[in-house]
Each structure stands twice: as C-alpha cells, then as structure tokens.
Image (spheres, helix red, strand yellow):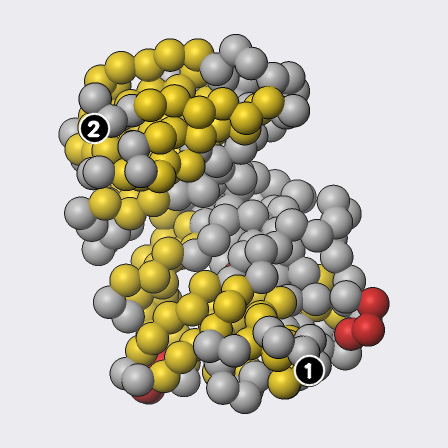
C-alpha cells in the first residue's frame, strides 16, 4: 500500500484482493496509481494503472468477461471504473458521485461499500446515504459503458445486495440506525416493494432463498425471493457475541455461518 502511495478513506482498508490468473488485484488509490496487479508467486508488480486521482473506497473488485475480454470492475469514492485485466489499461470510468438524487446526503458517495453486480453485459452499482443505484450497459466491446436507469429506493449502506431471477434484493438506508428491505427490477429499475422489518442489514442468497440479517438486534430471517412481498418463512435471533450485527451471512455445505463480534456461530440448515 505504501509503496504505491495509496490513500484510504477514513476507516482504513476493507477491500478483499481479487485473484485473476496469476495476478493479485488490489486498489490502493492515490495520485500514483489507482489499481495494481502483483504476481501471486513473487509479489512483484505486473502492472499498475494510471491514476484517476481518487481515494480508495471499501469495495472489493470483481472480474467480468465480456466478448472475450477480461475486465476488472471496482468503485472508488467517486468513480466506477473498468480496467483491462491483462495490462492495467483503464477502459472506462464514470464519476458515480455526480449521479445524484434531488436530496443528496453529504456522506454520499464516499462510503462506497457495495460490490457491483454483473450479468449479461449489465452492471449495477449502489451505495447508501440517499445516493442512487445505477444500471450501466457495456458497449463498444467493453471499452465504454452507458447509463440505462437509476433507482432512488435501494441505497444499500453496507449490507450488500443480491440478484435472483432478474430482481435485486437488499436493505436501504434511512439513517445510520434505520432502513427497510427492498426489491427492484433488474431490467427496468422499478421498485417492486419497500418493507419494514426491524432495520437494515446484510443479505445473502443460497438455494434460491434469501438470508436477511438485521443489524440492530441480530434477527435473521429466511425470506422467499419474490417481487410481490418481503415474505418471511422463518426467523431466529443471533445471541452469541457482542457489538453491531454487521457481518455477512455465509452458507456452505448446508451450514450457515454468522460472525458477531468475537463469536462465530454455525447452524445446520440442511433440513
């Protein structure tokens, strides 16, 4: 990080590196470069992109394949950008911070935390604090992107969003203590519902179901992913551990893992 003159935002570094072929991808930000690739065996620099003169955010990059081209997508505090995975060339960048709703919170969009979602040439990005979610379409063989629609309902704070059957699910931001659970249409950006349930939180998906984990009291719900309603099938409360319930539910081999502060909870959900 120091070698490349990286500049983190106020809460430090929260990016998970991305492995692409034999390269480890990381986004230090700052005036020297924005994104770098290191040899996974030696740690030597393979390439470093030009700088967009921006601070890194808390988003982990994703790799997309578009028309045979490998493109790394990430979000800084102001930009969403696409980088050629082979040589670090910045193919496109859009100043996400300039795409604003009528009422714009001063903290947006600097606290970008949400990993973009990609499907079939389209790319969705969202962040909290009343900042809009935006859908982009890759054009010109992936060398540029075009804005398709915006949505002002699902401004996800830091709990991530998921895509199931062309609908995006997640929780929005009302303030730092409150938020509702939402569904929007992937194709049009139309809000399908916005429902109250405790408060905002994290969402994961497995076996075509949603696992919604609200951050205040630690209630976790199994939710049917339907655009008609926030349909809770069952729920229980995470009691072990301390502090805010901010972790992401993880499901693997029929086991649900929830970290709460110093405690790691594992639940058998095969049945």
Left or right placement of residue 114 versus residue 195 in this view: right
In the rendered image, residue 106, in percent from the top left (x then y), is placed at 66, 44
In the rendered image, residue 31, in percent from the top left (x then y), is placed at 77, 75
In the rendered image, residue 189, in percent from the top left (x then y), is placed at 28, 50
Q: Can you say which quadrant of the picture contains the C terminus?
A: top left
Res. 28 image quadrant: bottom right
Q: Which mark is residue 231?
A: none
Crowdedness near tag 2: few (<14), some (14–19) or many (≥20) residues, C-alpha within 10 Å:
some
Secondary-structure class at tag 1: strand
Q: Which mark is residue 224?
A: 2
Sooner in the amino-acid sequence: mark 1 or mark 2: 1
User: Is 41 or 165 nearer to us in this picture?
Assistant: 41
Res. 2 image quadrant: bottom right
Q: Residue at x 23, y 45 (%)?
A: 164
Residue 150 versus residue 65 in the image, above or below:
above
Say which residue label 1 marks: 45
């Amino acid at each position: 990080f120091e070698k490349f003159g990286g500049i983190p935002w106020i809460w430090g570094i929260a990016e998970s590196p991305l492995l692409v072929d034999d390269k480890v991808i990381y986004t230090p930000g700052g005036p020297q470069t924005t994104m770098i690739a290191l040899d996974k065996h030696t740690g030597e620099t393979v390439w470093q992109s030009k700088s967009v003169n921006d601070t890194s955010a808390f988003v982990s990059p994703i790799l997309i394949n578009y028309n045979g081209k490998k493109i790394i997508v990430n979000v800084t505090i102001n930009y969403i950008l696409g980088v050629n995975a082979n040589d670090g060339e910045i193919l496109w960048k859009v100043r996400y911070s300039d795409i604003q709703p009528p009422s714009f919170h001063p903290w947006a969009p600097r606290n970008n935390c949400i990993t973009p979602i990609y499907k079939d040439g389209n790319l969705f990005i969202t962040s909290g604090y009343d900042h809009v979610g935006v859908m982009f379409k890759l054009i010109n063989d992936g060398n540029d992107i075009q804005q398709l629609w915006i949505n002002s309902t699902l401004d996800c704070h830091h709990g991530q969003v998921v895509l199931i059957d062309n609908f995006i699910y997640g929780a929005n931001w009302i303030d730092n203590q409150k938020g509702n659970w939402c569904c929007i249409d992937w194709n049009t950006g139309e809000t399908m519902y916005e429902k109250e349930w405790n408060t905002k939180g994290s969402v994961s998906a497995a076996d075509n179901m949603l696992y919604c984990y609200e951050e205040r009291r630690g209630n976790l719900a199994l939710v049917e992913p339907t655009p008609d309603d926030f349909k809770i099938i069952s729920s229980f409360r995470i009691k072990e551990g301390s502090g805010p319930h901010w972790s992401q539910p993880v499901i693997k081999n029929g086991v649900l893992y929830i970290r709460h502060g110093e405690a790691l909870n594992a639940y058998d959900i095969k049945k």
